[in-house]
Image (cartoon, rainbow, N blue to C red):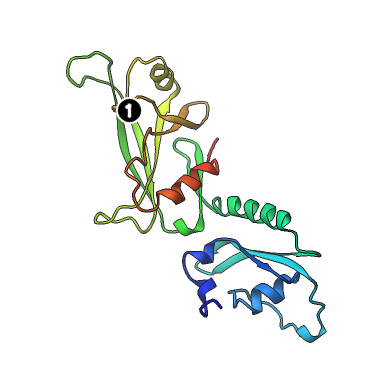
Amino acid sequence: MLPKDWINEFPQKFYPVIFVGYGNPLYAMRDKLELPIFGPYVDWSKQDLEQGFCTWMITVTAEGGISSTLKGYKGDVNISKILEVSNSLFKECFRTLKYTNNEYGFNFYLPLTWNGYKVIEDKWTGYKFGASGDEIAETGPILIIRDSEWTEKEPTQVIPIMIFTIAQWNDLKKEKFHIGAAPIGPTELGRNSKYVFALPARYNYAFPKGFEVVDEIMQSNPLEAF
């Protein structure tokens, strides 16, 4: 048995839940798991409780409340179908918050567990190959997205987004300058007519707290240029 209100607590509250055994989502999800979902009274003695499974997931959260999706799948319980549905919802739950940057022209999607995130602007620096000392060749902005749990004392894994002009990106690829000591360069996440957005090489090399979640976020193709 799960502890009372377990399903309403952070972080599991913000991940998809699958309840196997009943195809009626209201019966299984709202009443039995005490989800924060409100609706009309239902007399369950008059309901057909058909075999199957059902899903629940929060899609939007705000000061006024939450929005969520409930869906039932009736019939024989099929492990392949459950995995197909759960994997689809799991990918979707990593794209429920949207950060929009109109200055550079992109959206970035995050899971609801990152509610309260902050975006910090810094800059990247590129250096000339073979130059004596550290002769700067190019600079540009880098946006650092960090979750609400990040602190100076215990930093969590951040998401750094480097921003290049098209010309800068072409020069980087032609090895007219380099960034850092890594043998590989940044990875392109997307581009529009003016800018290329990229993830720095070895951005998570130290494996800080939360690096696994950030890896899952990045696998969901979270950046959408416009």
Say whether residue 222 is visible: no
Specify the farthest residue to the front: 79
Q: Position of residue 220 (x, y in %)?
A: 55, 44
Label 1, residues with CA under 10 Å away: few <14, some 14-19, many ≥20: few
Q: What quarter of the picture does the N terminus occupy?
A: bottom right
Q: What quarter of the picture does the C terminus occupy?
A: top right
- Label 1, on which residue? 182
Residue 46 located left or right of residue 159: right
Q: Residue at x 44, y 47 (%)?
A: 214
Q: Position of residue 165 (x, y in %)?
A: 42, 25
Q: Residue at x 41, y 54 (%)?
A: 117
Front-most of 160 and 64? Answer: 160
- How many numbered marks does the figure carry? 1
SS type, badge 1? loop
Front-most of 84 and 127? Answer: 84
Residue 188 located left or right of residue 204: right
Front-most of 7 and 188? Answer: 7
Amino acid type assigned to the residue bearing label 1 in the image: Ala
Residue 96 located left or right of residue 72: left
Say whether residue 127 is visible: yes
